[in-house]
Image: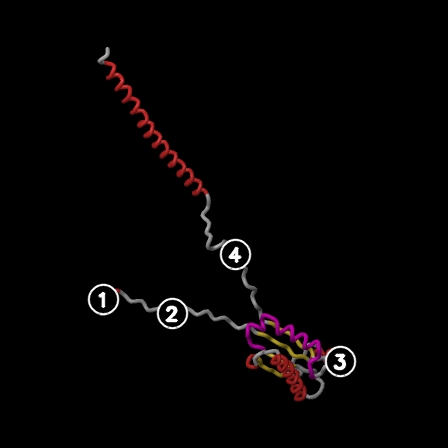
Amino acid sequence: MRSLAPALALCVMLAACDRPAGNAVDNGANAANAVENDMTANGADNAAEPVRSILRPEVAEPEAPKIEPLDVTIAFGASGLKLDDPARAALDTLVDTPAIKTGGAITLRGHSDSKGNDGDNRVASRIRAEAVEAYLLEKGIAKDRITLIALGETRPVSPNAKEDGSDDPEGRAKNRRVDIHVAVPMVVVPTAAVLPSISPVDRKDKP
């Protein structure tokens, strides 16, 4: 019996040493599995969320309003051949419009009533157009943008006489005017140059 005791003790010691090593391997495997499961779960959560760019926010920019040509009438009813305060106020408003600031052409058409002869009426209509031009030049409008046209009494907007043939002062006053047209310059978009294509045969002949 005494000879078996040392061998039995040795077996017990070896069994005790083997048990922690096995537990360490099992613990390491369990930890690796836990990390893998956590990464898989995180990957699934990330895949469920949409990818958002932090460099370019999804914000739609509003379109710029389209600028249209402009037509304005400056009255010379009571003033005759000179600009009065309402006419200057109307021109001040015109100068601040987007149509004027685009740099387009400005056409001034002077008009008169039918009182007097045709030659005098045409001269009067031109004087009115020149008065408007001078005011625009004072406001910084370039002269080469402006075109003057004297139409005299040829384009009335109101009758110069009533139906019974009597004079119509109010109608004549409406005809003494300058019509202003402000054009919007056209934007020309350059087209890309188209290069001639070279066939494979031509390429072989090229050095």
Classify 10 Å Cα crowding around label 4: few (below 14), some (14-19), many (20 and above).
Answer: few
Q: State the separation of the CA atoms marked 1 and 2.
A: 25 Å
Residue 90: horizontal and vertical position, in percent? 67, 74
Taking the view exactly as shown, the residue that stands out farthest to the front is 2
Q: Nearer the viewer, mark 1 or mark 4?
A: 4
The one of 50 and 112 positioned closer to us in this rendering: 50
Earlier sequence position, callout 3 versus callout 2: 3
Earlier sequence position, callout 4 versus callout 3: 4
Amino acid type of the residue tagged 4 in the rendering: Ala
Q: Which residue position holds label 3?
A: 169
The one of 182 and 143 positioned closer to us in this rendering: 143
Number of numbered discs visible in the structure rendering: 4
Question: Relative to 2, is 181 above or below?
Answer: below
Name the quadrant of the C terminus.
Answer: bottom left
For residue 85: magenta? yes
Q: Which residue position holds label 4?
A: 60
Classify 10 Å Cα crowding around label 3: few (below 14), some (14-19), many (20 and above).
Answer: some
Q: At x 47% / y 52%, what residue is drawn?
A: 54
Q: Which residues are magenta?
A: 81-106
